[in-house]
Image (cartoon, helix red, strand yellow):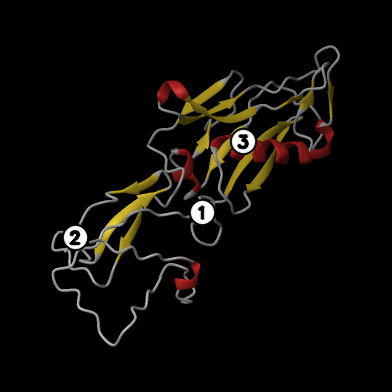
Amino acid sequence: MADLINLNSSNIVQNGFNNVLRYEFSGSSVNFINSEIAIQSIGLNNSQFNIDKKQDANTTFSIKMPIGATTSTINIDLKSGYYSYSTINGFVRNQLETVGAYLIDCSGNYIHYIRIQENPTYFCLPKLYLSPVPTSLPAGWYSLYTSIGTGLQTTAYTPQITIQPNFNKIVGFTSATYPSTQQTSLQTFLSNFTPEINPVSNSIIRCNLIINNYSNPPGIIGSFTNQGLQNSYRKLF
């Protein structure tokens, strides 16, 4: 006969890490000889940040925008939180708009010259797009470009993005500047190694009552990711 043990927020041990739950059995002694334990289910809000200044130091990178006859560097510092590539791109656009590094077309659309997005053709790996900034406005367009420098550039160069260490693991690019020198044609770059959009790839579940001779440490009874529970009904003695 199986007995269900329910662990919830009332069982959390206040150790500062929010990662231990304790269940107190009634009675003076409990005999667990020849007993088995298995995980039935886990319900947990996904509150893990994949961008975290304190834990992972992976919040910063920079963009060099061509301005007049020179460039202006915009330092990007993401707020700690959980980001997709789409929300990273949205944050970048917001920062560019804050300093006026964009144009507005005749329909009122904001035009940006750098983009980070998933590429579904290549297993949703992130891809960088950097387009040349024009030297003059097309008919009906207007610009706030003067707020970060001397206005539109004299040569139609692309922006450049500098990928910093730690943030590079999120987007799958070697830490470097892309493109390495200013270019006058569309530049695209696909991740050159497998990115980790979430630095926490797996959470391990341990129980102090378990001796698992096939794991290290020996108390492991299962694991889960943000996609669900793994080996959820595996019995360990």
Residue 205: percent from left, percent from top: 32, 61
Q: The disc labelled 3 sits on which kind of residue? A: Asn
Separation (CA) of disc 3 from disc 1: 25 Å
Above or below — where is 47 with respect to 138?
Answer: below
Image quarter hosting the C terminus? bottom left
Q: Residue at x 33, y 78 (%)?
A: 25
Q: Earlier in the sequence, mark 2 or mark 3?
A: 3
Q: Is residue 34 left or right of residue 170?
A: left
Q: Residue at x 39, y 74 (%)?
A: 22
Q: Secondary structure at mark 2?
A: loop
Residue 119: percent from left, percent from top: 48, 25
Q: Secondary structure at mark 3?
A: helix
Separation (CA) of disc 2 from disc 3: 45 Å
Separation (CA) of disc 1 from disc 2: 26 Å
Displayed quadrant of residue 204: bottom left
Residue of label 2: 236
Residue 225: percent from left, percent from top: 39, 48
Q: The disc labelled 2 sits on which kind of residue? A: Leu
Residue of label 1: 45
Q: Which sits in the foreground, 52 or 210?
A: 210
Image quarter hosting the N terminus? bottom left
Residue of label 3: 89
Q: Are marks 1 and 2 in contact (CB under 8 Å)?
A: no
